[in-house]
Amino acid sequence: MDRHEYDLCVLGSGSAGYAAAVAARGMGKSVALADGTQALAGLCILRGCMPSKTVLRSAEVAHLARTAGRVGIHVDRVYPDPAAVVARKRRIIADFAQDRVKDIERFPLFRGAPRFVNRGELVVGDDVIRARKFLVSTGSVISVPDILGLREAGFVTSDDVLEMEDLPATVTVLGGGAVACELAQYLVRMGCIVTMVQRSKTVLSREDPDVGESLASALAADGIVLFTGTTVVGVERAGAKKRVIATHAARDIALESDEIFLARGRRPNVDGFGFDAAGIAYSENGVAVNEYLQTSNPDIFAAGDVTGNVELVHVAVYEGQLAARNALGATPKAARYELQRARAVFSDPQVAIAGLTERECCERGITFAVASYPFKELGKAIVADLTQGFIKLLAAPDGRLLGVAIVGAEAADLIHEAIALLYFKANVRDIMEMPHLHPTLAEIITYPAEELAERLERELHVVVRP
């Protein structure tokens, strides 16, 4: 066995692990990466953010061509070519992955099946790695629920959908989260007949109901059949097809399709790494960490999806950098998620949230005022035929902005103004005083801000700002 010693050894080289390694190297520390035998570059580049947004763009172009008649442009024929879409995706992702792998390989890299053998040693093949500190960033894996007959009947995951060169004619989607909504819309715009089955009353059930309801209306307008508030009882084969048996509105239903797309989310990747030997407390919900991202072993930290905290790439990067600095620096700093939890769904219309939601304010007993404004009344949205959705602002009684939700065109980009406003603890009056170019989609934020400013001054007798 060959033995190696480093200041930091990072288990997993995805977004969190790579960010941690770069941060530690920037501190002048010796760093090694340990990873499995699968392709390097991380979930975001290989099977997540980048490939999904690539194929979503293709489906969006197909949709724009089909609906071009609404703006006076007539397209004779539109036919999606799934094989060409996937080929384009592979070319783009190969370039991204190649660049990231080159960066990863600048570090000492140990490939194999990494596992802790005690509280301070990691074994990878014939190599034993000791380090002053370790970082666990093993990411997440697709979660497969215990549904009767599901495994026997067979299903595809998001990984499979992104590689399909020949799409099924009919698909039943199990799930209503971000991935389910994005890829269900991709499938329907590529010509599939799509049915979605969601347990909760709305899609995007973790958000405020009006957000999910607005997106559901858009999905239905695309032709997706939605069954919300529906419990899947089991799955079975029906000849060449697959049948989902469920309970909806107090009655049994059976949904047949050529394929089942399982989109019930991901779970932390905690199995097979010897966490028990290392004294790392964990469960199926992830590795337990304190506010400094330190595990139950004080010399081992964790970051990214494996913690089960916030499964977003920018959060993984933030946690990786913070964990490395906390592990190797003099003064640890607590993780703060108020702004880091900003998120987006790249459906059409897009969904983006920053700050607090109405639900969170109610749960925490925070007094707030709310105002919204629809895109269908915004000039730029009308002329661009982008009228789906709304913007919603939440403000404290003194007018300080608490949260922003956008369902609409380019929401994932528009939300960055809200993030900046929240970062600087801005007041709704500040929004009114800032210039917003006309006609733009961005100026939509001024309408609910104006309503809130006037209402808070009038009804609550609070002067928002003198």
Image (cartoon, rainbow, N blue to C red):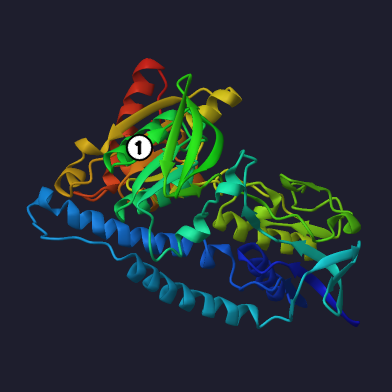
On the picture, is 275 further left or further right than 325?
right
Against 125, residue 49 (above or below) is: above
* Residue 273 location, quadrant: bottom right
On the image, the x and y values in percent for residue 321 come to 66, 63
Please, what secondary structure does the residue beneath circle 1 have?
A: strand
Whether residue 232 is situated above or below residue 237 in the rendered picture: above
Q: Is residue 399 visible?
A: no
* Residue 295 image point, x, y percent: 81, 52
Q: Residue at x 70, y 50 (%)?
A: 307
Compared across the picture, whether 439 is left or right of 38 comes to left
Q: Amino acid at mark 1?
A: Val
Number of numbered callouts drawn: 1
Residue appearing at x 41%, y 70% in the figure: 89
Q: Which residue is mark 1?
A: 225
The quarter of the picture where the C terminus appears is top left
Estimate how packed mark 1 is, as few (under 14), some (14 to 19) or many (20 or more) residues with alpha carbons within 10 Å. Answer: some
Residue 227 x %, y %: 42, 32
Locate the N terminus and report the quarter of the image it occupies. Answer: bottom right
Closer to the camera in the image, 273 or 354:
273
Vertical placement of 69 versus 446: above or below? below
Q: How far across and down, in percent of the image, does residue 345 sit?
A: 43, 48
**Residue found 71% across the figure and 44% down from its top:** 285
On screen, residue 283 versus residue 78, left or right, reads right
Asked whether 93 or 150 is in front, the reply is: 150
Residue at the front extreme?
Answer: 239
The reply to whether residue 113 is in sight is: yes
Q: Is residue 126 left or right of residue 49?
A: right
